[in-house]
Image: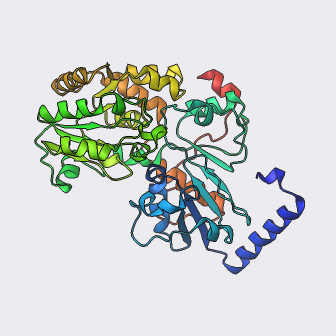
Amino acid sequence: MTRTLLSPLVRAARDLDARWERIRRPSVRSVIFDARTAMEYGMMAPVHRRLLADSRVRPYLMSSGRPQRVAAIFRDAPPGCPIVSPRAAMMSRFDAYLAADLVWATLPRGTRRVQMFHGVAGKWSQMYDRPTTSMRHWDRLFFINRRRLRNYVASGAIDSGSTAIRLVGMPKSDCLVDGTLSRDGVLRSHSIDPARPTVLYAPTWTRFSSLNAMGEELVAGLVDAGYTVLVKLHENSLDPKFINSGGVDWVARLKPILSRGHGHLIESGDASSWLVAADVLITDHSSIGFEYLLLDRPLVRIAMPELISKANIPAEYVELLASASTTVEHAAEAVAAVEQALSDPKEGSVNRRALTAELFHAPGQATTRAVQELYALMELDPPECVTVAPRTQQTYSASHARSR
């Protein structure tokens, strides 16, 4: 429920509750992160880890949608982080609520709600890229790029001058460009020989994905070619429900193939470090494919027309990914494309760089911007370790859209 739709009595009670908390604990803030998948938590994890360094801030983790799976969802979280149940959260007051999907936990005592988004691929456009319903109930929208911001305004989901608009970028992708990770370092940390070319296969989910159409054949071809083969499955592909995985146990199917050579099934929710480790990425249509381009390395795209249709992906996003990748239709073509990419990894670099400049706002400092905005929202001075970057234009106007 938005603040404008609250009854005067409820609004007054929440304001009184907030003022009382400020009197009791003037320098303490509570923040809750709500996720349904490990991937969603991965989008918010850099912000979570940054807040853990401030003793004045108390971060909590919760899965309002899948409370029975919290251990798996937050498996990549630092040890000892408090996890609360949806029922316990209802009894508490939080200064900020963060989500990377369209989840909405019931918090009767009120909070300030922040939407961080969980990708840039344009899938399920009517919900995530051009919403057919209002998004005005969010107090802050941490946009990853101006393209989606423009689409939100054009679709009527938000107003052009909304105070909720913040152009932040993608905190999860900072590590791809800030020099904290190296290819060889990541591989050695997992006891993988860095001398061998490394190929990462990261398909999206649904029964219309390349995984269902040719995944076993493709992985087998890469293993037989002698590459180090990394496979990162979408979390929904691990769900036995037919609508998510096609009813296939993909771990059971792929592990024997990977064990024939130098293959590894990635189990972490956030694949960012593995992107750094890969010399080439193969995908169909996934945000991870766009994120990989920040490394300016070759991308092989498997064309899956039915996936594009069923996942309601706008043609512009299909064309964008195609412009910065090598498109194939069959497993054997993908294996051949990997060999070609390794022989000339700089080919296509201009297009890759242009696309990442379009889809990722100022990568490398997105976490700092997100944390800075969060402290402002919570009305708390940031610690000295949070560098206050120059504020970019946060509000959006139709005139700005026309000028681009």
Q: Where residue 321 appears, x then y in whole percent?
A: 41, 25
- Residue 132 is left or right of residue 38, and the answer is right
Residue nearest the viewer, comparing 136 with 163: 136
Q: Residue at x 29, y 49 (%)?
A: 266
In this view, which residue lies farthest toward the right? 8
Evaluate whether residue 31 shows in this view: yes
Q: Residue at x 17, y 53 (%)?
A: 188
Evaluate whether residue 362 shows in this view: no
- Residue 3 is left or right of residue 44, and the answer is right
Q: Where residue 86 appears, x then y in whole percent?
A: 61, 65
Q: Where residue 362 appears, x then y in whole percent?
A: 46, 40
Q: Quadrant of residue 97?
A: bottom right
Q: Where residue 307 appears, x then y in whole percent?
A: 45, 26
Q: Quadrant of the C terminus?
A: top right
Residue nearest the viewer, comparing 136 with 267: 267
Q: Residue at x 69, y 50 (%)?
A: 139
Task: Give the colouring mode of the picture.
Answer: rainbow
Q: Quadrant of residue 276?
A: top left
Q: Looking at the image, is 60 positioned above or below residue 299? A: below
Q: Residue at x 13, y 42 (%)?
A: 260
